Amino acid sequence: MKKVLVIDDSALMRRVISDIINQDDNLTVAGTANNGEAALDQLIHGAEFDILLIDIKMPKMDGVRLLREMNRSRIRVPSLIVSSIASESGSETIEALELGALDFVKKPISSIGENFADFRVELLKKVYVATGLDSRSSDFGGLGHPRSDEARRPSTGTRPAGPRKLHTAQKGTKLVVIASSTGGPKALQSVVPFFPANFPYPVVIVQHMPAGFTNSLAQRLDEMSQIHVKEASDGETLKPGTVYIAMGGKQCELIHKPNGSYCFSENDKPPRGGLRPCADIFFESLVDTAFEEIICGVLTGMGSDGSKGISLIRESHQVKCVAQNKDTCVVYGMPRAVVDSGMADDVVPLEDVTGMLMRRAGA
């Protein structure tokens, strides 16, 4: 039985989250706190928990400061941010992830309806991963459900007619694509800043995030990096020497224009497997491109997003794939999928990912 500490200034939300946790046979709420100060007091005085669920906006001590104080006191407990923060406060979430929070879940607008059911399932899945429980053995009380019409349909493959490449490869054109999920925002800080300012190819990152947070992530990475980092925008032309973060809450695709250039489509296509953006969908959009080579990086994350898309583009392009190794992953899911399928050309620690991507790109 994994013990959970729920930290939230709202008595209603503490009750709602506690009910979700206590309804699961493998979890129990072993404590609650109405602000970070009260939570820190419990931790300092020896209370033991397997995971903390932390709100951001709280009186006396907010969630970011709590994580900072935990680091200062060398208190190591897995933590998830569970907050209703608006997109304009996305920078606080990014800071919380930098300070050690494993992931975050946005609170639902209401405690009933489809959004709440999605919140419940997402919260439990992420708690399971953070505490080392096997989420595959649970249907989370049978209350989970597909999040889109596409998720309800049985898998029939990524492209019914099979991959086709309509454009002849243009010599010297290369694209680097990085897919990441749980643990990704922090992992990217060990990858993106090590690209030089004059890196000759564009880099696209598909990080699983809801709307409103990827711009803050891009701004933070841009501050840390020599290479320019920005959130991709709809209709924007792809340029070399730039790192683009796929927009949260949208599907990101690359469109090959008649003049030979490429632009982004940030669109409202439905989630796949609950994911928007979805790395598989981005990779599928690369089939009809003229890149001579596509270099893929797969970082920490739940599930197997990216593996099907990489398999598809391997049929039409020269592809090299670099996977983060198990020891340095927060969650060894997405990298494991490409390793187990035999598509990983290199499996390296996080700190070696950039160097290997550059080596594979010949840069």
Image (tube, grey):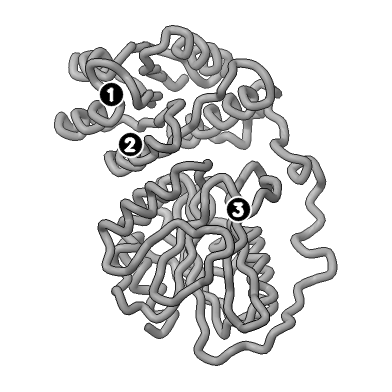
Q: Give the tally of numbered discs.
A: 3
Q: Pointers 3 and 1 in contact (CB under 8 A)?
A: no
* Residue at image coords 25%, 13%: 38
Q: Nearer the viewer, residue 43 or 107?
A: 107
Q: Position of residue 201 (x, y in %)?
A: 44, 78
Residue 244 x %, y %: 45, 62
- Provide the residue designation for mark 1: 62
Q: Find residue 266 and report its image quarter.
A: bottom right
Whole-percent x, y for residue 24 in the image: 57, 18
Between disc 2 and disc 3, the foreground one is 2
Q: Residue furthest left?
A: 72
294, above or below 226, in the image:
below
Q: CA distance from mark 2 to mark 3?
A: 24 Å
Q: Is residue 149 left or right of residue 35?
A: right
Examine the rendering and report whether any part of residue 73 can be seen.
yes
| Residue 335 visible in the picture | no
Q: Write down the residue under mark 3.
A: 278
Front-most of 262 and 217?
A: 262
Query: Does residue 71 appear to the left or right of 162 in the view shown?
Result: left
Tell me whether circle 2 and circle 3 mark residues in contact (CB < 8 Å): no
x then y, percent, for residue 255: 64, 70
Separation of disc 1 and disc 2 at Cα? 10 Å
| Residue type indicated by callout 2 | Glu
Mark 3 residue type: Cys
